[in-house]
Amino acid sequence: MSVATTEPQKPGPTKAARPLTGSMLFPELVWAHWEWQIAAHPHTFCRPGRARRLVARAARLNGRHPQPNKSQLNQPPVIDLEALEARYQDEAAAFETSEGAIIRVYWCTSEASAVVLTAKKVRRTGLLRRKRRDLRIHRATDWVTAEAPAIAELLHSGDTLAIRINEILDPDPRHIAMEWVFSEQSYLLGFVERTRGRPSREETASAVARHRVEIDRIERYYDRAAKKTARIQYFLGMIVGLGVVAGLGALIPLMLKPFVHLDFHSLGVQNFYACFGAGAVGAIVSVMTRMRHENGVKLDYEVGSSLIYMLGAFRPVLGAIFGVMTYFALDSGFLNIPAPEASKVFFYYALFAFVAGFSERFAHVIIGGADLTVAKALTPPATTGQKAPNGRSPTADATGAATGIPHGARPEPSS
């Protein structure tokens, strides 16, 4: 007789072993706080809603107690406030471990709803890996706004604005803007509670108008702060690009060593490096000059900080390329510009390279002049006496076309 043996099954993961996100933990935290507070202060937590108030009033007139809440149906006759508080503390600790410390909170007193602002230090992944204070707004307000859909939409628009603020702005303006959004959402929740969960059309229209004015102010503040943040990131990227230009300048002799010998005391090499550096510096000075104006440097600040850093780093490299191109155009004689005396040649090249890096329009003029010179050099000159394929002389055809006389026709003698 054989006996079948089965291996003991491993127990499933417990609640503590499963990682939970803040979106899963926050509703549980709200419900734990609600159950604790209605048990500790039952006389101050009244349910909103006209239908529920009428039912409670009819029950009192008939000599009966109002129907208890759903959260009170499964409670024992003796409420253990310490157990409810301990459960709330456990939920709060789990939530703060996942999402960071709670720095602002608004608990609704008429329904299990709340909005909180948390702060957590996280390490960013990208071009500059540094720690930042991540501010987030967590909201669970569907219960209190069940009969106020217009207010629910306003709260949702505040969430989307908070996401943009948290990802784009620097620490100080981010903290101000997030506190501003949290204050506005707290006001909306207070408005719903003041109107017993069912605001009238006039009250809703007034709240919506006021909210739009406040959101416009937050949007303008966010736009100005984001533009300044993007300019700072672009400038830091240019500093990194200037270091890249210096590194490329040091690598040029190593790359050319197998082919030519560079004499750093020669005037040509000195002029080359003067144009190389002057073009990069001119590009940086050009951007810094335009940054004085509000719309001098147009940057899309929502493309991401890494891309803005890369664009800024490429600007000095582009200026150095324009500076070297200017040196080659002047030294080769493509541009018909007379060179000064030998003692001033260094400043002559450096000045033109700086202007080329400073102004892309001037660089385009140099490129256009070089293209015209090359085109003239590659175009063969017209030769006299050369016969066309039809046997006619191109000079005679051109003369006839210019005078308007057909080929072969003799002009009438003038009287």
Image: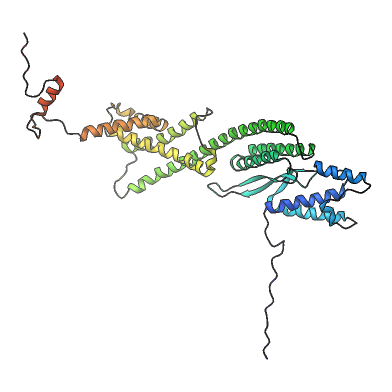
* Residue 189 rendering spot, x and y as whole percentages: 74, 39
Residue at position x 42%, y 40% in the image: 317
Nearer the observer, 357 or 220: 220
Residue at position x 37%, y 29% in the image: 362
Nearer the observer, 38 or 183: 38
Q: Is residue 43 left or right of residue 402?
A: right
User: Where on the picture, by quarter, is residue 336?
Assistant: top left
Q: Residue at the far top: name it.
A: 415
Nearer the observer, 103 or 74: 74
Q: Is residue 7 left or right of residue 248?
A: right
Q: How many numbered marks are there? A: 0
Q: Is residue 248 left or right of residue 292?
A: left
* Residue 101 rendering spot, x and y as whole percentages: 72, 48
User: Where on the picture, by quarter, is residue 86?
Assistant: bottom right
Instruction: Answer yes or no: is residue 262 visible.
Output: yes
Q: Residue at the far bottom: name it.
A: 1
Q: Is residue 411 left or right of residue 245?
A: left
Q: How is the image coloured?
A: rainbow
Residue at position x 81%, y 43% in the image: 51
Instruction: Answer yes or no: is residue 46 visible.
Output: no
Nearer the observer, 138 or 282: 138
Q: Quadrant of the N terminus?
A: bottom right
* Residue 24 rendering spot, x and y as whole percentages: 69, 54
* Residue 394 rendering spot, x and y as whole percentages: 11, 29
The image shows residue 6, relative to residue 144, as above or below, that is below
Q: Quadrant of the C terminus?
A: top left
The image shows residue 169, relative to residue 341, as above or below, that is below
The image shows residue 341, relative to residue 389, as above or below, that is above
